[in-house]
Image: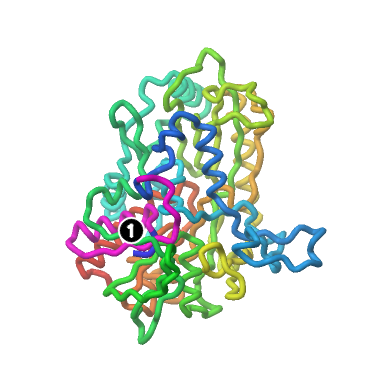
Amino acid sequence: MIGHGLAGAVAARTLRDAGLDILVVDAGTPISATPATHVRNLDMCRTDTALRADLVRTLLRPVSFPPARSAEAASPPVMPDGNGINRVQRRDRNMTAARTTSVFGGMGILWNCFAPRPDPGLEQWHGIDVREWELLYTRAEELLAVGADLATGSRRQEFVLNTLRDNRFPAAHHAPIAARAVDGRIHWTGPADIIGHAPITVRHATVRRLHLRGGRVRGAELLDSRTGVVSTVEADIFVVAAGAIRTPALLWASGMRDPNSALGRYLTDHPLAFAQVVLDPDLREDGLGACVEVPVDRDHPFHRLVVSDGHDSPMLEGRVDDRLILSLYWYTSSEPRFDNRFVFDSAATDSIGLPQPTFDYTLTHDDRARHRAALDDLRATAALLGPTVPTSPPQLTSPGASMHLMGTTRMSITETGGVTDSFGRVWGADNLYVAGTGLIPVATAANPTLTACALAVRTAQAIAHGTHAQ
């Protein structure tokens, strides 16, 4: 298992529960005593929410930036010394806000822990039967500990729910959270919680190449992150769960470079409208606070999320109580298109030595129209909840700001339509599988994390029971 994020942890746990021996390899640096635990569970982050927000921002690193215009004539260094600088990146085709991370557990220790199911009719891929989707989502929710209404009793939660339901959104409800109550505190789900006490071997190392020969992976080339020793690990099955950027980068570095294939293509994102508002001081309270969602519908293709995750901007100089700030996230969808893609270059590498991607990404007229409609809808909703935070007015964010990248290793029914089959097995490679949001082949506005974990369950079950087939 290459990658110890959420999807990798779900697949590893499912395989181990089926009796298979698992080696999990992750290139990231552990930042906690229990590697791959969520940053929200760290004592320093529990007592200082602004510190948590600052830590998350620091750990999310830029993927691809063109050089500053004043320095274009110079020759900036390639990654990792260049901090994402990319001499061939076009500004008008960049996913400017896209970020990756190099911590142990990946995005699984940084995510917001909201785990909604997509709408079965509007956002769910029909290559898998709806009844099977139900079973997969249920199991993924069990592994992620999704379900408990942890905001019960919160006056902020009741205010937001009642305001939305009474005015515009009768379907507003408590957003499903991947967390559980432990000793009177909320414990947020990270990869370490999914693995639990299952006897799984975890190794801190970087996989920079898979050795493909005769339609099979014969071994993975590992670089030990501490000693610098290079070795080869052999296994019966290889699963790459390194994220929507680094998974296709690893496959490309391993020789899968057909320019007409879907690898790194069909890149989609959630164009995001965002704002923060300030609640009435009477609603000041400690605790989780508001966590409300309004799902998509045919007339409003946005996934709306209102949460008490605000922190005082340094520009406000402490003049707003963090507990009174609501963050509004309106996620929309972008249509999967073959021309939206990464282009990889072996001459430039990222911070762990994989090929650095160059984005070739644009939005269609319809994508932009949905994005603008989301902003209008958000602006009207924000006015119901309170005055806008001066530093966070209703705004359209830059491409990649949602951190929800999808489609770059997409599933397909036929070999010409994607990178893997419906079980996540890479076309043309008998023992190579992929897990993560890169598999999602359809436009969706809902957070893709739960879907990626549901697909990881399906992949692992297919491997364990030998039911996969190309």
At 22% across and 59% down in the image, what residue appears? 16
Quarter of the figure that contains the C terminus = bottom left
Image: 26 above or below 173? below
Quarter of the figure that contains the N terminus = bottom left
Image: 292 above or below 27? above
> As rendered, which of 291 and 25 lies closer to the eye?
25
At 67% across and 26% down in the image, what residue appears? 317
Residue 409 is at least partly visible in this image: yes
> As rendered, which of 40 and 224 lies closer to the eye?
224
Q: Which residues are magenta?
A: 4-33
- Quadrant in which residue 87 is drawn: bottom right
Mark 1, Cα crowd under 10 Å, few <14 / some 14-19 / many 20+, is: many
- Quadrant in which residue 463 is drawn: bottom left
Please indicate whether residue 405 sits to the left or right of residue 430 in the image: right
Please indicate whether residue 342 sits to the left or right of residue 23 in the image: right
Element under label 1?
helix
Residue that extends furthest to the left in the rendered view of this protein? 19
Residue 8 belongs to the span the image colors magenta: yes
Task: Measuring from the top left, give residue 185's x and y in whole percent.
Answer: 34, 29
Task: Measuring from the top left, give residue 38's x and y in whole percent.
Answer: 40, 43
Residue under pointer 1: 456
At 37% across and 55% down in the image, what residue appears? 7
> As rendered, which of 468 and 443 lies closer to the eye?
468
Residue 61 belongs to the span the image colors magenta: no
Please indicate whether residue 238 sits to the left or right of residue 95 in the image: left
Give the amino acid type for the residue marked by disc 1 in the picture. Answer: Ala
